[in-house]
Image (cartoon, rainbow, N blue to C red):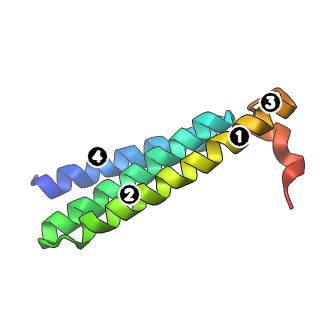
């Protein structure tokens, strides 16, 4: 098994762990962290494929994805905390009436 396969298996494990966290847990902050774990699994697979092809485009794309993810977290966490402050819970089912 070469380096690319090992990285892809690790990326798959990260993505699966994040997916299980999103599906099983109902706490909004844990769900956000699980989604970030899924994103990191995808980024790792992108870097593994870019390394296999010998190009730098994958690393540049991962850098851009990290910037967008940081902006998303900078916006999502205050929104979740404001919702939790108003409802006094972080349970995702308590916010079902916010669907548009």
Outermost residue on the top side: it is 88
Along the horizontal axis of the image, is 92 left or right of 23? right
Q: Distance between the residues labelled 2 and 3?
A: 32 Å
User: Viewer-nearest of labels 3 and 4?
Assistant: 3
Q: Where, by quadrant of the figure, is residue 85 drawn?
A: top right
Q: Mark 3 points at which residue?
A: 85
Residue shown at 24% from the left, 73% from the top: 57
Q: Mark 1 points at which residue?
A: 80
Residue shown at 33% from the left, 60% from the top: 63
Q: Foreground residue, 19 or 37?
A: 37
Q: Position of residue 38 (x, y in %)?
A: 45, 50
Residue shown at 84% from the left, 56% from the top: 99
- Whether the residues at callouts 1 and 2 have beta carbons within 8 Å, the answer is no
- Whether the residues at callouts 2 and 4 have beta carbons within 8 Å, the answer is no
- Which circle marks residue 47 in the picture? none
Label 1: few (<14), some or many (≥20) within 10 Å?
some
Give the mark, 2 or 4, whose residue is nearer the N terminus: 4
Give the mark, 4 or 1, whose residue is nearer the N terminus: 4
| Secondary structure of residue under mark 1 | helix
- Which circle marks residue 42 in the picture? 2
Q: Mark 4 points at which residue?
A: 10
| Secondary structure of residue under mark 2 | helix
Label 4: few (<14), some or many (≥20) within 10 Å?
some
Residue shown at 12% from the left, 53% from the top: 3
Q: Where is residue 54 in the image (x, y as percent from the top left)?
A: 11, 71
Q: Foreground residue, 1 or 43?
A: 43
């Amino acid at each position: 098994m070469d380096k690319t396969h090992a990285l892809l298996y690790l990326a798959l494990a990260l993505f699966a762990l994040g997916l299980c966290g999103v599906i099983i847990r109902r706490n909004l902050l844990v769900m956000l962290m699980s989604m970030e774990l899924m994103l990191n699994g995808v980024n790792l697979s992108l870097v593994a494929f870019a390394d296999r092809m010998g190009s730098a485009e994958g690393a540049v794309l991962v850098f851009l994805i990290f910037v967008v993810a940081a902006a998303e977290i900078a916006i999502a966490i205050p929104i979740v905390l404001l919702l939790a402050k108003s409802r006094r819970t972080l349970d995702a089912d308590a916010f079902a009436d916010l669907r548009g």
